Amino acid sequence: MIFALLALTALGTAPHGHKAHSASPRQSSRDSLTSGYNPVSPHWQHIRTMMTDFYYNWTPAERAWAGRHYDFAMSGDANAWRAQNPTVQHYKYVLLQAAILPKTPGKGDLQSAWLPDMSRWYVAHPQFTLESAFLHQAGQPADSAHRLKPWGWATPTWIINPADAGLIAYTTDRFQRAAESEDGLFIDSQGSGDIAKNSKGSSEYPVPSKYPPELTGYFTPYAKLLATLKGALRTKTIMLNTGPYRFAPDSAFLAAAGATHMEKTNNPISSDLPATWVWIDKLLASGVFVDLVDAHDAADMPGVVKRGYATSVEDAFRRMKFAELASYYMVVPRAPDRLALQLVNMWDRPYPPLWLKAQEANIGHPTAVRRLENAGVIARDPVGQPVNVYTRDFDRALVIFRAQSGWGKQIYGDTTGVRFALPAGEKWLPLAPDGSVGDAVTSVSLRNGDAAIVVKASTIS
């Protein structure tokens, strides 16, 4: 599908990047777009939604609301989730590489600390030696006083030796018990960069002083440990928080575990986003379940405003989340079951105000792969920034994403707008963040880092 593009010298834009217009929402169209809701998961045919409740204190009303909107949940109380949505997939929060030491006064703590459980298990299994389960400081005796002790989660940690037979046996038992009444486990801080940093400086796995992506001495047994754990949990999910890491070891970890929580990666104001899409394509093609997670939560919006992305916190949130939704559509398979969207990761306020209604608009399934438009596309916008526009066709809509390009300072305001002429032969209705659709348009405008979704009127009237 080919676009004609024109630079804009003066153009008003709505918060989500469309050409400003005075049309009122079409109630019948909105109702048609959001039909087919299911009270249990999956709630919608075209999208899978996921969230974590690790950072928030629930009220019964909000718990009920969340159960009606999310298909997957991490952390929190599985029974409370299932009371509201019996088919929700719930993954318990656990740790693997780092054993958290007892709570440090004045610092945070996690209920996932497992040292007491580990000590009891080793007493019951005297054929194994507890000390060999941990890494030790290079050049020091391999005793408890010289265990490798980096910091994590605002407290000291000890780092496991993934090749140790006792550690493998204990961790397998611990994970089986942890997952007994769960659909799976979510393991935090599992990117190759985090794992390399934590294991550096040990006598068991000596490495150069600088971070080496090829740290196979530790990565290889770690991937084998993940494969052992996945085999022990059988059909249950093991989701690793690999975040933005995309090195070869991360591929090995995910091939072993089968699922990833990609924290801080769905970022419309990062030039790395198209490369992230390619990475997700590869993961999905290999059968990995992907949770695509936002980079900017509600608390980050003041900083986003300071970068010039919007003039208010409210507009920044709407614009950012709408672009994140379009980013999801750039990679979603025709069957969306293995790609979940998480628009908010750190919850610090009630859920309903942070929900993007446009998620509920059923635009159908993709009918083509995304493409980078290269015919009739201007090279730069009015302020001189590169213009890279991706499009993707769906059953009921066309999704358009203007990806940020280049590094260094970026401009995002109205002066960066470029108009995109929509294909002839279809009546296009712009979708808004609140889920409404406007009157027909023949073009849309996108500023740097913007997205648009235009719905085929013939499919919803």
Image (cartoon, rainbow, N blue to C red):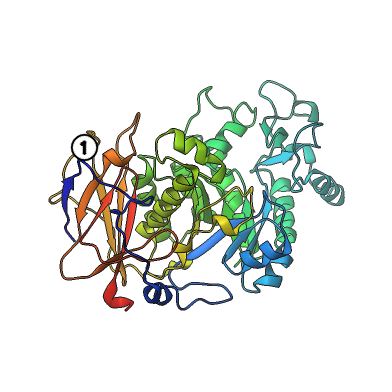
Front residue of 131/444: it is 444
Give percent across and percent down for residue 25: 37, 67
Left or right position of 209 against 388: right
Front residue of 376/155: it is 376
Left or right position of 4 against 134: left
Q: Quadrant of residue 407?
A: top left
Query: Residue at coordinates 12% horizontally, 50% vertically from top-left?
Result: 376
Query: Residue at coordinates 53% horizontally, 22% vertically from top-left?
Result: 209
Count the marks: how many?
1
Front residue of 127/46: it is 46
Give percent across and percent down for residue 251: 46, 48
- Placement of the N terminus among the 4 image quadrants: bottom left
Asked whether the viewer can see residue 330, the reply is: yes
- Placement of the C terminus among the 4 image quadrants: bottom left
Asked whether the viewer can see residue 238, the reply is: no
Q: Is residue 36 above or below residue 407?
A: below
Front residue of 8/158: it is 8
Give percent across and percent down for residue 390: 27, 53
Q: Amino acid at mark 1?
A: Pro
Left or right position of 275 against 77: left
Helix, strand or loop status at disc 1 = loop
Query: Residue at coordinates 79% horizontally, 41% vertically from top-left?
Result: 129
Badge 1 crowding class, 10 Å Cα cut-off, few under 14, some 14 to 19, many 20 or more, is: some
Q: Is residue 307 above or below residue 448?
A: above
Give percent across and percent down for residue 189: 60, 43
Would you name the residue on which mark 1 appears? Answer: 382
Q: Residue furthest left?
A: 376
